[in-house]
Image: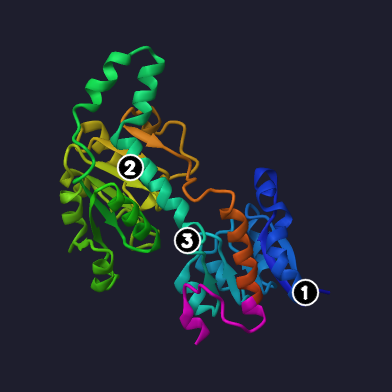
Amino acid sequence: MAKFKVAASKPEGPFGKIVNDYDLEREALDKIDAEVVYVNPEDKNGMVEILKEVDAVIGMRIQLPAEILSEMKNCKIVSGMAVGYDYIDIPAATKAGIVVTNDPDTFIEEVADHTMMLLLASWRRAVTQDRKVREGKWGECRPELSRYPRLRGLTLGLISFGNIPRLVCKRAKAFGLNVIAFDPYIQEHVFHEYDIEPVGSLMELMERSDFASCHVPLSPATKGMVSEEHFKAMKDSGIFINTGRGPVVDEPALIKALQEGWIAFAGLDVFEKEPINEDNPLLKMDNVILSAHVASASSRMMPEARRRVGREIASMLMGRRPLCPINPEVLG
C-alpha cells in the first residue's frame, strides 16, 4: 500500500492526452511513495467519498467549494498548475487547514507575449486586413489604417500589476507606449521601479487609456468588476484586452460597448463561459479578435507547470514548505 494518496481528475478524452496518466507529476510523487487515485468530477458523491481519504489533490478540473472541503479531513494540500485558483474556496480551505498552491510564474512570458499580440493585432486590425486582401479588397486596406494614429505615444492601462502585467509593461515600453496601472494592493515603489504611473481608480484608468488590458484574478470580490460604467468611460477609439479571467468582466456590457461604439475594439482570450457559447454575439462581430484561453500555451508551459504541481505536493507531504502557497497562514 502506498504511503500517500493524491486525487486527480480521471484522464479521459483529449484531457487524457494532455496529462498522460500524470506521468510528469509522478516524477516527484513516486519518490515519496504517493499513489495517484482518480476521481470523476461529474460524479460528485463518488468524488467526495474518495476526497475524504486522500492526502492531496491535483487541482485540475476539480471544483472544490466549501461543502466539499469540509469533508476532506486528511487532505494537506491542493496544488493547481495555473495562476488562477477560482476553482477552490480559499477561505474554506484555510479553515480546513488545507494549503493551496498555484503556479504564478511558469508561463508568464507566454501570457505577456499573447497580450501584446492581441494589442498589436487589434490596433492594426490584422484580421480585417487579412480578410480584405483575401477578398480582393486591396484598395480598402490602406484607407482603413490611415484613420488611426501611430502606436508610439498612446497610453496602455494595466488593470492589476502582478507578474504578467509587469512583463507586458516592459514589452509595451519597447513600442513607445505610455503605461499606467491600477492595483491598490501593490506598493507605490514597485510602480516607480517600472517607471509607470499608478492611478487611483479603475475609472480613471479606463478614461485615460487607449488600451485597457485586464490581468485580474477571479475571486468573489473581482467578479464583474469591469462594468458598463467603465466601458462608457473609455474613449470611443479605445481597445479592451483580457488575458486574465472572463468573469472579471461584465460580458454583456462589453458586447453592448462594442455594438454601440462606446469602444472601438477588443482582443479577448478569456470569456464568461468557456468554451464560448455558439450563440455568443462576440463570434459574429468584426471588431473583436478572439483566442481560446490559450495565452499561456507553449511547448514548455504544460510540462513545467505539471512538474511544479508534483513537487509542491511532495514537499508538503514530506514536511517541507511548498514554493507558492496562496494561504501561507495555514503553514504557521
Give the alpha-carbon distance from disc 1 to disc 3, as whole Å.
28 Å
Task: Estimate the x, y position of residue 19 in percent, counting from the top left.
Answer: 67, 53
Residue carrying label 2: 119
Circle nearer the viewer, 1 or 2 = 2
Give the alpha-carbon distance from disc 3 to disc 2, as whole Å.
21 Å
Quarter-of-image position of residue 60: bottom right
The type of residue carrying mark 2 is Leu
Task: Estimate the x, y position of residue 116 in percent, counting from the top left.
Answer: 36, 46
Residue carrying label 1: 33
Image quadrant holding the N terminus, namely bottom right
Is 72 in front, or is 210? Answer: 210
Task: Estimate the x, y position of residue 264 in percent, counting from the top left.
Answer: 23, 35
Does 73 sit above or below residue 308?
below
The residue lying at 49 percent from left, 87 percent from top is 332
Q: Of label 3 and label 2, which has the lower sequence position?
A: 3
* Chain part drawn in magenta: 315-332
For the view shown, which residue lies furthest in the top direction? Answer: 136
Is 100 in front, or is 71? Answer: 100
The type of residue carrying mark 1 is Asp
Q: Of label 1 and label 2, which has the lower sequence position?
A: 1
